[in-house]
């Protein structure tokens, strides 16, 4: 049974860089079309490497480091939980500000870079996902195939999956706005 209002769209089926570029492009396209866009996408500064990935806040323009320098020879996970927490808090503040404005919220979309291992474990951007759903805002994200089972348990019937394709995102948004 199709969702009356497909609240969450998760794109998948391409490399991380392709998906993050798609989310950024979709955010720009939706905003140009009149949508109010809140959220974070991954951004790799020109010439940067994996360790230089930032989360770019689409409202404030602030960036949050996604990885921390563990020093030479370190073999552990370099993910920076403080950077993720700061990014999630920024999204939550933007959602709260949008709610305080009142009015019709059907023009608002929250873009969250991904549901990955951190989110599957209840960390990372999990609180931002919760805030968006509690506010009944549409969410555009991506889901890592390695945590697909956790994703399905997390979103239940609120989400649908789509290929990493701008037309699929625009189709979803058109349905979401019409249903809102």
Image (cartoon, grey):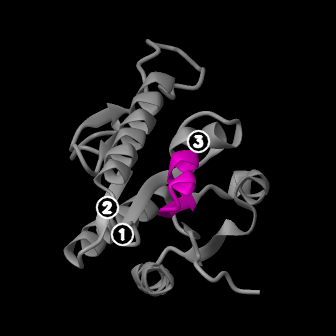
Task: Report crowding for label 1: few under 14, some 14 to 19, many 20 or more residues within 10 A (C-alpha).
Answer: few
- Secondary structure at badge 1 equals loop
Q: Residue at x 24, y 79 (%)?
A: 33
Which mark, by number, is residue 51? none
Q: Are marks 3 and 2 in contact (CB under 8 Å)?
A: no
Circle nearer the N terminus (1, 3): 1
> Is residue 95 found inside the magenta-colored segment of the image?
no
The count of marks equals 3
According to the picture, the residue beneath numbered tag 3 turns out to be 126
- Secondary structure at badge 2 equals strand
Q: Residue at x 51, y 25 (%)?
A: 81
Circle nearer the N terminus (3, 2): 2
Residue 178 picture location, percent across and down: 45, 87
Q: Nearer the viewer, residue 157 or 164?
A: 157
Mark nearer the viewer, 1 or 3: 1
Report the span colored magenta.
129-142
Circle nearer the N terminus (1, 2): 2
According to the picture, the residue beneath numbered tag 2 turns out to be 37
According to the picture, the residue beneath numbered tag 1 turns out to be 104
């Amino acid at each position: 049974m199709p969702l009356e209002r497909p609240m969450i769209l998760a794109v998948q089926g391409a490399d991380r860089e392709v998906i993050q570029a798609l989310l950024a492009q979709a955010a720009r396209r939706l905003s140009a079309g009149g949508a109010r866009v809140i959220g974070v996408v991954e951004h790799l500064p020109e010439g940067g490497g994996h360790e230089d990935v930032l989360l770019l806040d689409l409202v404030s323009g602030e960036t949050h480091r996604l990885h921390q320098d563990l020093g030479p020879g370190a073999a552990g996970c370099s993910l920076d939980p403080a950077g993720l927490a700061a990014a999630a808090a920024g999204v939550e503040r933007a959602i709260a500000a949008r709610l305080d404005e009142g009015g019709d919220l059907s023009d608002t979309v929250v873009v969250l870079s991904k549901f990955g291992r951190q989110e599957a474990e209840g960390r990372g951007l999990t609180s931002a996902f919760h805030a968006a759903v509690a506010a009944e805002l549409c969410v555009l994200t991506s889901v890592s195939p390695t945590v697909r089972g956790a994703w399905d348990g997390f979103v239940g019937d609120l989400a649908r999956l789509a290929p990493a394709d701008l037309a699929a995102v625009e189709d979803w948004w058109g349905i979401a706005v019409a249903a809102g």
